[in-house]
Image (spheres, grey):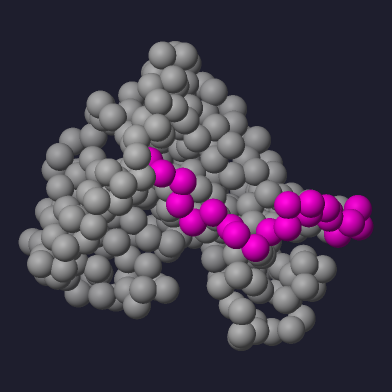
């Protein structure tokens, strides 16, 4: 169970179901104790460091797209939580997300086609991206099997819980058990809109994409095993999972109303 004086860090990996989860997790904490830091919203880790230590110590939940290591910015004990997604599906979703969010073509033409993106994944450091997040290697040029072991060690030693995007309701049920939360409600958010329904990847591109995600695929398999072990350890049963599924039936209006209220609170508190 999460202690109030401790900090829970949600390591939000791009296109791994994190936006839907973030809404659910933030609901578990008072608005004044939640800190977000997204570079796309103009927040940097230097700004977090500049927050007076007395105030930083009061935060209970921190979420960002920054990689592992942000616990060093806070004086209180901290642990992590994250979601991992099947690497091939995540990579394809990220590509289409970029295209959707970049209609004016600010991205280099060499990566605007799916073939160009896959061929240039290593150059732009999008290969094995989940491992890069977990092992704090977003800027590393060349990844090795040793880096995979670093990521595994981080997951085992610093993460209170790890969810699987493809098993979202089971993940919610596990988180509820681990942290003693009575109810996690969510609405699917940030679903990639530009991916064709009939999308198929050419065999040679799929082979290359697998090669660029070789370590991520191994990490994902490791997490699947870890996930199943945690479900058994915490005695997550069908009733828990069914409860998480039923929570999705709440109206979007109710959750959006609560989110709007929290947004007003954040403005009053001058939180990012």
Q: In the picture provided, is 31 more to the left or to the right than 132? A: left
For residue 54: magenta? no
Q: In the picture provided, is 179 more to the left or to the right than 267? A: right
Please provide percent x and percent y for residue 76. 18, 50
Q: In the picture provided, is 160 more to the left or to the right than 96? A: left
Instruction: Please say if 160 is above or below 267.
Output: above
Instruction: Please say if 172 is above or below 112.
Output: above
Range of the magenta residues? 186-206
User: Mainly helix, strand or loop, the magenta region?
Assistant: loop
Inspect this view and state whether residue 74 appears: no
Instruction: Please say if 124 is above or below 74.
Output: below
Q: Quadrant location of residue 100?
A: bottom right
Pick the residue in front: 47 or 12: 12
Residue sitting at 78 percent across and 54 percent down?
A: 199
Residue sitting at 34 percent across and 56 percent down?
A: 63
Q: Quadrant location of residue 55?
A: bottom left
For residue 188: magenta? yes
């Amino acid at each position: 169970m999460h202690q109030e004086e401790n900090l829970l860090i949600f390591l939000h990996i791009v296109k791994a179901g994190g936006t839907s989860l973030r809404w659910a997790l933030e609901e578990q904490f008072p608005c004044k104790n939640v800190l977000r830091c997204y570079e796309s919203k103009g927040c940097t880790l230097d700004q977090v460091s500049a927050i007076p230590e007395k105030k930083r110590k009061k935060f209970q939940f921190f979420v960002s797209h920054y990689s592992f290591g942000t616990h060093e910015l806070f004086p209180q004990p901290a642990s992590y939580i994250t979601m991992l997604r099947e690497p091939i599906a995540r990579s394809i979703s990220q590509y289409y997300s970029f295209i959707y969010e970049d209609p004016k073509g600010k991205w280099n033409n060499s990566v605007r086609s799916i073939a160009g993106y896959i061929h240039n994944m290593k150059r732009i450091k999008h290969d094995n991206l989940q491992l890069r997040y977990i092992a704090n290697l977003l800027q590393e040029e060349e990844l090795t099997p040793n880096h995979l072991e670093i990521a595994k060690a981080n997951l085992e030693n610093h993460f209170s819980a790890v969810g699987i995007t493809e098993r979202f309701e089971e993940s919610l049920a596990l988180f509820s058990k681990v942290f003693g939360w009575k109810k996690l409600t969510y609405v699917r958010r940030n679903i990639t809109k530009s991916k064709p329904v009939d999308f198929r990847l050419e065999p040679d591109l799929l082979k290359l994409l697998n090669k660029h995600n070789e370590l991520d695929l191994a990490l994902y398999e490791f997490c699947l095993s870890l996930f199943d072990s945690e479900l058994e350890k915490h005695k997550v049963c069908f009733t828990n999972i069914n409860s998480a599924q039923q929570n999705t039936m709440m109206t979007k209006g109710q959750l959006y109303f609560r989110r709007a209220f929290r947004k007003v609170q954040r403005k009053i508190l001058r939180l990012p």
